[in-house]
Image (spheres, rainbow, N blue to C red):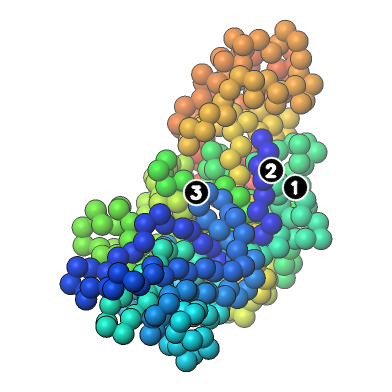
Amino acid sequence: MKRIATTGCLLIVAMMNSCPRLKDSSAPAVDQQIIQPVMAIAPLEQGRGQWQVASADKVTVTVTAPGAKQVLILGRPEGVAEDAQEDMEEKQLELSRLGASTSGQNERDGKFITQLTLSADFAAEVWAEAVYADGAKRQTETIALAATAQDVNPDNPGEAAGGSIGTDESARSDKLTGGRIRRATFQAGEPDIRLTVNLPAFRLTLWQNGAEVRVYQIGIGRKNFPVPVGERVATAVIFNPNWIPPDSAWVRRTKGVEPYEKITADDPRNPLGKVKIPLGAGYLIHEAAKPSDIGRLTSHGCIRMLREDLFDLAEKIISARNLPVTKLQLGQSRKNSERLVVQLDAPLLVDINYDLQVIESGVLHLYPDVYKRGAFALDSLRAELQSVGIEGANLTDANLQGMLDRVDNNRQFVISVADMRRGRWNAGKALPVVETSLQGMGERASVR
């Protein structure tokens, strides 16, 4: 159940596309002697998949375009970003405009150099467009920027989220809690808060000073738009957010919505609801469109919550950090459509895991493999049970497969470790993954 953790959570990200952007056929012909321009961005580190991560707050952009008179650094938003998108033109952002004199390079060398400082949740494909004396234009391949690296509690990363940093273990697992989850009442002004998510359990937990203070049930991304597993950070809570649709296939298939169109909070086409918490690279926690979103694969890579649960989470974050927002402002945000951005004083860790076999407080929970990652192998389950001392004849393939067969898209299988040790395999039962109440919680945290 181990995975490699990113050294920080994303605030500037880059993704390479395989094909260069080409000027349309109506543009002036480019001299065959002109060399295809090339753009490089540094410093970068390899992230998950095709994404790369900037390892500094500022990045240096170098464009090599011999013979060019001018270079434009352009961006096309990749996800739902804030701030920077609002200033963009119809289809793209102009991040920087460089002439030969401003770059400090001669025309023959063709080096155009600049530094970019991006907003905290900026997320966009970026490329350079070289402009030549005859009016011809050529564009580089794209690199998408979207998140700076933040250290995850470098002094004690293991305690930051129940010890789940760097693993794919649920923070609620007995392996990390010692068999008992401490629970406490939320305290205002206590800033040590963390969020953990276990995707197949459709569960988000708010921790404060290492204790569970609230559990929320959630909806998650569809199979072809999965929520990314790993450590992320939130740097703001945004009430009444605008939505700018990305240039994605699902957006182009949506009637009445255009890529990069600014859709305001009071527009019924806005799917974000009353609150969003950006997690970088266009991923969000935001309001569910309807109650039936909870416990389902419903979004395009985001975590969805019921409106009241999301307001509760947002208000707890603000209260824990003593942020300068009044109760009157929060109340008005519920009623009106005016955008309110609350910047967090320090990044809030959000640790997202994909743990299908969780022993929590002495009870085994087998969750559905919603993203079909193949982790429901008999060997994996056998190893999980062996880790709590269940051995020998009890771990037959028939017993293990019988439990796995009781799990489906909407139901988990639950059985106590004590019953399994006694060979009482018929004591287990199938339960809904999303329940109408959560054991041990004093607040409503679920939906029918």
Residue at numbered disc 1: 163
First in sequence: mark 3 or mark 1? 1
* Above or below for 339 versus 202: below
Image coords of residue 183 (percent x, y) = 73, 49
Between 113 and 373, the one nearer to me in the picture = 113
Q: Residue at x 52, y 74 (%)?
A: 62
Camera-side mark, 1 or 2:
2
Is 208 displayed left or right of 295 in the figure?
A: right
Q: Which amino acid, mark 1?
A: Gly
Between 205 and 44, the one nearer to me in the picture = 44
Between 32 and 342, the one nearer to me in the picture = 32
* Above or below for 351 versus 334: above
Residue at numbered disc 2: 167
On the rendered image, what quadrant is the C terminus found in?
top left
Image coords of residue 447 (percent x, y) = 47, 46
* Above or below for 360 versus 301: above
Q: Distance of mark 3 from mark 1, alpha carbons?
A: 21 Å
Image coords of residue 144 (percent x, y) = 46, 64
Between 196 and 184, the one nearer to me in the picture = 196
Marks 1 and 2 in Cβ contact (< 8 Å): yes
Farthest residue to the left: give it. Answer: 26
Q: Distance of mark 3 from mark 2, alpha carbons?
A: 16 Å
Q: Which label is found at residue 227?
A: 3
Residue 409: which quarter of the image?
Answer: top left
On the rendered image, what quadrant is the N terminus found in?
top right
How crowded pointer 3 is (Cα within 10 Å; few <14, some 14-19, many 20+) is rated as many
For numbered disc 3, what is the local secondary structure? loop
Q: Distance of mark 1 from mark 2, alpha carbons?
A: 8 Å
Q: Which amino acid, mark 2?
A: Thr
